[in-house]
Image (tube, grey):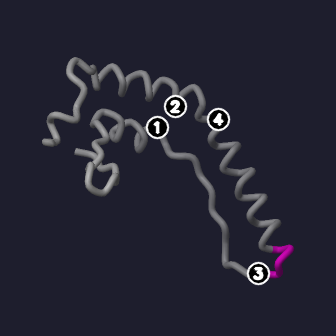
Amino acid sequence: MTVESQIPSGFDFEAHRRAAVDQYQKRGPLYESFAEVVKAILGEALRNRRIKVASIEARAKTLESFAPIHWRPILVNQNTEIPWRR
């Protein structure tokens, strides 16, 4: 099976990218809050176990770093089932 045969015919990747970016932009504040909550939970868990760390960082992906990856299809190598971007 070739890589090209795995791409759905007629699929509009640009429309998919625009929709994904739009949805990500709408949910950005939620992702930022989620990152902070995960950071707080991890920090508390480490303190409870008396595990010392230099720092814990958390951030949501910026729109600029999110947008470029969503215009390419994710293809799956049928032999390894590992997704990869073309």
Q: Mark 3 and mark 2 in contact (Cβ < 8 Å)?
A: no
Q: Give the labeled residue for mark 3.
A: 51
Residue farthest right in this picture: 48
Looking at marks 2 and 3 on the same chain, the residue that comes earlier in the sequence is marked by 2
* For discs 4 and 2, the disc positioned in front in the rendered view: 2
Provide the residue span drawn in magenta: 47-51
Q: Give the labeled residue for mark 2.
A: 24
Q: Give the labeled residue for mark 1.
A: 63
What kind of residue is marked 2?
Answer: Tyr
Looking at marks 4 and 3 on the same chain, the residue that comes earlier in the sequence is marked by 4
Q: Give the labeled residue for mark 4.
A: 29
What kind of residue is marked 4?
Answer: Pro
- Disc 4/disc 3 C-alpha distance (Å): 30 Å
Quarter of the figure that contains the C terminus: top left
* For discs 4 and 3, the disc positioned in front in the rendered view: 3
What kind of residue is marked 1?
Answer: Leu
At 82% from the left edge and 78% from the top edge, which residue is drawn?
Answer: 49
What kind of residue is marked 3?
Answer: Ile
Looking at marks 1 and 3 on the same chain, the residue that comes earlier in the sequence is marked by 3
Q: Mark 4 and mark 1 in contact (Cβ < 8 Å)?
A: no
Left or right: 50, with 39 as reference point? right
Please tell me whether residue 20 belongs to the stretch shown in magenta: no
Residue 54's disc number: none
- Disc 2/disc 3 C-alpha distance (Å): 34 Å
Is 76 placed above or below 54 here? above
Q: Mark 1 and mark 2 in contact (Cβ < 8 Å)?
A: yes
- Disc 2/disc 1 C-alpha distance (Å): 7 Å
* For discs 1 and 3, the disc positioned in front in the rendered view: 3
